[in-house]
Image (tube, grey):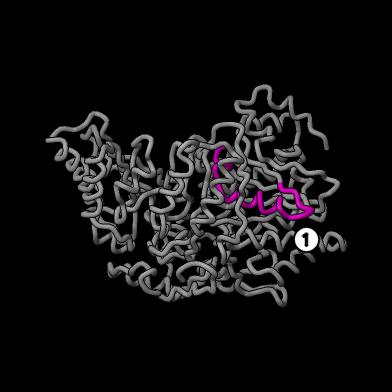
């Protein structure tokens, strides 16, 4: 189908989101293509193009002979209106092919509140929403990403869900599909063979779920012989040998993170009990300095970028970070204006390291104490102290930094108002450090930002059984903190809306019965639910009521250890026994050491080429 796309852009705010043809985008001759795949990011272009995983999988798929991967992003409301008004299907950026003409459409699941955007992309692309309504003429709908570790809320919509890291599994799936397509096998035959023969492939339609009278899960059972009862995540063992894109796509318009993204390692050994990423991305695997420098050279030449971000869960924990920064600064001083780290740790901050990162100008420093008292930081196993913060603040203010941002969570398990008072004290103590250094005065540009998020219990964490604070409790805590900081001109308090956090919590720990709610909310007009200007809590509550489902069953309810959880048939490599031990230690405010200092028997033991496990 040929689309007259030009008339769509007449009154669109940012046509650069949709025109494609960026530097390093991939064009192929369709006569040479066996498999056409479109990577779908369920948010705007500016956000999706900032996502490293998209760049990696785009490169992986396009490196496979006979496969062409293209891209599509959620469209803004103005573009959606023009598509619908002209009865035109949503199309890919590279070839402007309607989405329903592809062999695969693959969605990345980065955030629970993007689920209605997934349905909107499918509907705009003329793809039936439910797997049961699609036939041989429709694309295979694939999903993966961190939210896939509880895939059940999207089970009705996905044909296949991939667990774990995608570089190798994508190649295996494409090769299997090429073989099946050549032999004219059916979609069901392909999905069944993939579920049987490829680790990390979950086909929801091949599993049945039964429920107890109290609405908890009774059983999750495979419907076919030879498919696993537990689906095991995929792990890349050798980071140096893994595919990494040397020709990063350079966007047409300004995006959220317009810079080189250089992944330095995967995994984390800190063991923060609230952090899902720290559990599901185990074990830790570093790239060598030699490989990183080689990649940096090639990416600088291929993109023309002047800024670089060293990407990982905790970049300051890279074992040779100082040496890497020195080498990068030496080799690229003429073409690089800055290097950024996603966040710095209070317990290993150094002025020397920060100046290597911010060599051109001293912008703000960001740290995450997470909780206001030592007791609560011990509960969550956040290995930093008040002394760490005050020492770091002293170093920063003494060496020319004037802006510090501190991240906290409210609603953590066992939290009291004494812990909230601790947040207040840390804010004012940090400001007092600045005043002491400046003889009682405050520099006019000094700013301390206290930023708080609402705690959301996530699967595969020690807190997966814990109750989430209800909306009114979270609001009361936010009002309390806001009032405490009201009189300070130099301390600002930012917070995240409890309504969206509550909904996030529902889908984070939900089961496949929530698919009906997602579809009902979408039909009411819900989309871009992570955006304040689009989010409608009332529409969501109407959808839950129509489906006769209680939100609190999924969010504010405490689970028992023996309850079958919706994601128990997924194996992330970390055992439930380890998570229970960590939960018990949390309730006693006992800490666990960094597992680089001794194995804690989380069960991730994997034979890897590099790493510490």
Judged left or right of residue 101, residue 411 is left
Which residue is pictured at 29% across the width and 46% down the height? 351
Judged left or right of residue 245, residue 374 is left
Q: How crowded is mark 1: few (under 14 residues within 10 Å), some or many (20 or more)?
A: many
Residue 52: within the magenta? yes
Query: What stretch of residues is rendered in magenta?
Result: 46-69
Q: In this view, does 533 lie above or below 416?
A: above
Q: Farthest residue in the top direction?
A: 10
Which residue is pictured at 79% across the width and 60% down the height? 187
Judged left or right of residue 240, residue 370 is left
**Residue 527 visible here:** no
Please tell me which residue lies in front, 250 or 272. Answer: 250
Residue 396: within the magenta? no
Residue 212 at x, y percent in the picture: 54, 71
Please tell me which residue lies in front, 8 or 611. Answer: 611
Residue corresponding to mark 1: 177
Residue 600 at x, y percent in the picture: 39, 74
**Residue 524 visible here:** yes
Which residue is pictured at 54% across the width and 74% down the height? 607
Residue 59 at x, y percent in the picture: 66, 50
Q: Farthest residue in the left direction?
A: 439
Q: In this view, does 155 lie above or below 91?
A: below
Q: Is residue 186 above or below residue 351?
A: below
Which residue is pictured at 66% across the width and 65% down the height? 201
Label 1, secondary structure: give it.
helix
Residue 540 at x, y percent in the picture: 53, 46
Q: Quadrant of residue 568?
A: bottom right
The N terminus - image quarter: top right
Please tell me which residue lies in front, 417 or 435. Answer: 435
């Amino acid at each position: 189908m040929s689309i007259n796309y030009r008339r769509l852009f007449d009154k669109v705010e940012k046509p650069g989101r949709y025109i494609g043809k960026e530097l390093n985008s991939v064009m192929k001759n369709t006569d040479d293509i066996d498999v056409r795949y479109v990577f779908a990011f369920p948010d705007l272009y500016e956000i999706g193009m900032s996502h490293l995983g998209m760049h990696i999988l785009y490169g992986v798929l396009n490196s496979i002979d006979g496969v062409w991967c293209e891209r599509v992003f959620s469209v803004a409301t103005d573009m959606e209106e023009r598509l619908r008004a002209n009865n035109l299907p949503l199309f890919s950026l590279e070839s402007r092919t309607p989405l329903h003409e592809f062999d695969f459409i693959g969605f990345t699941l980065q955030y629970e509140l993007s689920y209605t955007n997934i349905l909107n992309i499918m509907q705009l692309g003329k793809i039936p929403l439910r797997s049961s309504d699609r036939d041989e003429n429709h694309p295979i709908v694939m999903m993966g990403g961190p939210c896939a570790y509880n895939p059940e809320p999207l089970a009705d919509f996905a044909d296949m869900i991939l667990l774990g890291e995608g570089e190798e599994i994508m190649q295996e799936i494409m090769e299997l599909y090429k073989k099946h397509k050549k032999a004219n096998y059916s979609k069901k035959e392909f999905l069944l063979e993939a579920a049987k023969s490829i680790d990390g492939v979950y086909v929801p339609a091949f599993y049945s779920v039964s429920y107890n009278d109290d609405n908890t899960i009774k059983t999750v059972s495979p419907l076919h012989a030879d498919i696993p009862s537990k689906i095991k995540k995929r792990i890349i063992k050798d980071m140096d040998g893994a595919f990494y894109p040397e020709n990063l796509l350079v966007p047409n318009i300004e995006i959220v993170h317009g810079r080189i993204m250089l992944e330095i390692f995967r995994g984390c050994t800190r063991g923060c009990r609230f952090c899902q990423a720290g559990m599901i991305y185990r074990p830790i695997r570093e790239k060598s300095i030699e490989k990183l420098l080689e990649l940096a050279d090639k990416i600088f030449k291929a993109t023309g970028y002047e800024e670089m971000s060293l990407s990982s869960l905790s970049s300051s924990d890279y074992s040779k970070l100082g040496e890497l920064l020195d080498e990068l600064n030496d080799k690229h001083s003429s073409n690089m204006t800055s290097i950024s780290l996603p966040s710095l740790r209070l317990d290993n901050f150094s002025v020397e390291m920060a100046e290597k990162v911010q060599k051109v100008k001293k912008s703000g420093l960001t740290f995450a104490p997470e909780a206001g008292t030592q007791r609560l930081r011990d509960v969550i196993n956040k290995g930093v102290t008040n002394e760490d913060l005050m020492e770091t603040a002293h170093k920063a203010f003494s060496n020319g930094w004037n802006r510090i941002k501190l991240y906290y969570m409210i609603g953590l398990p066992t939290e009291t108002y004494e812990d909230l008072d601790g947040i207040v004290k840390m804010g004012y103590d940090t400001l007092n450090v600045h005043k002491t250094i400046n003889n009682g005065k405050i520099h006019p540009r000094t700013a301390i930002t206290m930023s708080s998020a609402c705690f959301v219990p996530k699967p595969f964490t020690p807190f997966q059984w814990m109750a989430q604070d209800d909306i009114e409790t979270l609001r009361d805590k936010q009002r309390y903190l806001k009032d405490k900081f009201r009189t300070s001109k130099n301390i600002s308090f930012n917070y995240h809306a409890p309504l969206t956090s509550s909904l996030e919590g529902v889908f984070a720990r939900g089961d496949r019965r929530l698919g009906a709610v997602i579809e009902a909310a979408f039909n009411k007009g819900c989309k871009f639910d992570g955006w304040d200007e689009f989010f409608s809590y009332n529409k969501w509550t109407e959808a839950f009521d129509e489906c006769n489902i209680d939100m609190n069953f999924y969010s504010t309810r405490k689970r028992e250890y023996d309850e079958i959880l919706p994601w128990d048939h997924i194996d992330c490599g970390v055992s439930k026994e380890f998570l229970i031990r960590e939960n018990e230690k949390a309730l006693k405010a006992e800490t666990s050491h960094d597992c680089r200092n001794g194995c804690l028997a989380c069960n991730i033991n994997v034979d890897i080429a590099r790493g510490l496990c």
